[in-house]
Image (cartoon, coloured by chain):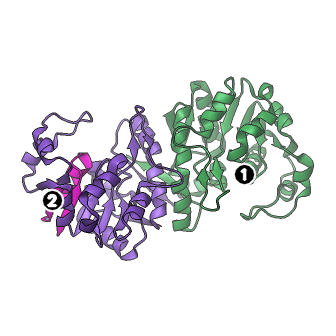
Chain colours: A green, B purple
Amino acid sequence: MKIGVLGTGMVGQALSGKMVELGHDVMVGTRDVTGTLARTEPHPYGFPAFSVWLKQNPGVKVATLADAAQHGEIVINATNGVSSIEALRQAGETNLNGKILIDVANPLDFSQGAPPTLSISNTDSLGEQIQRAFPQVKVVKALNTVTASLMVNPRQLADGDHHMFVSGNDTDAKAQVINILTTWFGWKHIIDLGGITTARGTEMYLPIWLRLWGALGTGMFNVKIME
Amino acid sequence: MKIGVLGTGMVGQALSGKMVELGHDVMVGTRDVTGTLARTEPHPYGFPAFSVWLKQNPGVKVATLADAAQHGEIVINATNGVSSIEALRQAGETNLNGKILIDVANPLDFSQGAPPTLSISNTDSLGEQIQRAFPQVKVVKALNTVTASLMVNPRQLADGDHHMFVSGNDTDAKAQVINILTTWFGWKHIIDLGGITTARGTEMYLPIWLRLWGALGTGMFNVKIME
């Protein structure tokens, strides 16, 4: 399948690498192709520069945001959440219309230091903002509640015995995303929270996720819903 | 032990009833004692009026917020989160100073309908506001992430195999609260998230809790942290 991945950070790398490994035709989009390919220093969080990572993942194509969006039958938003709307505008509404957009981003605002606050929350969410800005795109919020490597390999933790959540207005689109999470990545437990407004729930979960990361000393955890 | 419980709703009832059952000397405080004892119609959420509940729990004492706060060696804030600061001012700073205040409240704002938003969030939390307003009180945020009956009887769900979180600046106070949660109520797994600012995490967890309640059709669930 042709997939467009917007964003070259830790999440874009994890998703692209996994999907190429599975045999998909993945094009990663970035605002500044030349600049992205020129940078070689690791990110402060410890993951490699995209150009370094790319050498180990040569099957991944690199292009502009617009080209990656056009390429994808499904598009994934793995850009920085505080500037996702702007990045999606660069990707181009006509390149996105009618497609499923899996929104993995969180609007984490580090401008006042760590831990970050959310640039959108409580009465709105990034998922909703994207859906309003691109009404003909089928936005499905998913994967934003776990660390990047867990997104694509949930069974490395407790043999996958923990939960993922999806939010979105289009039932068929959600069913397709659930199928991708299950059959491509190996998710066992997925809860459909409802329409895209329920993305407020999963985005506002980030503050406790970040404090748990601090308390546990690792991002390699997730919640299992016990009922 | 002498306990003051501020608030007569579902949470105040569950906590008071359990602690009286355990043999503690519990005084419940309410803004309007006469009015609270006069109302007999059930709450719209289905739990009984306090006066009706009280007949089945005759060991519970009822008084003003100030008397209940003065009575307690430990005080529990189970008031409506959007007006907790005001209720605590009525309870009186001198009646609270030096004591542990277990803050169970969530600042859920139903003024725009359901699901509620938070009246405080993101860059602040109710726990922090209370700690700032009452600097000599040892505020420990706890129990606000589960439905009332689970707070005091966690083993009714998955034999207690799920997590509770605590936040607070005073290490000894947190240790005492953890001891209460464990030995009185039966909590097996408690994670200390850190200082009171981490209450942002557990309060902002409410939006996903509310959506899960909708998706699962029951409030009788909780998260287990898998790591």
Q: Is residue B21 magenta?
A: yes
Reply above or below: B218 against B131: above
> Residue drawn at (81%, 36%), measured in percent from left and top?
A90
In the image, what residue type sits under mark 2? Met
In the image, what residue type sits under mark 1? Ala
Indicate the position of residue B148 as horizontal and vertical percent values. 28, 49
Of residues B34 and B191, the one nearer the viewer is B34
Pointer 2 chain: B
Asked if residue B80 can be seen in this view, the reply is yes
Instruction: Look at the image and give the residue range highlighted in magenta.
Output: B1-28
For disc 2, the neighbor class at 10 Å (few under 14, some 14 to 19, many from 20) is many
Q: Residue under circle 2?
A: B27
Reply above or below: A210 against A143: below
> Residue drawn at (69%, 23%), measured in percent from left and top?
A136
Asked if residue B153 can be seen in this view, the reply is no
Q: Residue under circle 1?
A: A14
Of residues A62 and A119, the one nearer the viewer is A119
> Residue drawn at (27%, 36%), measured in percent from left and top?
B45
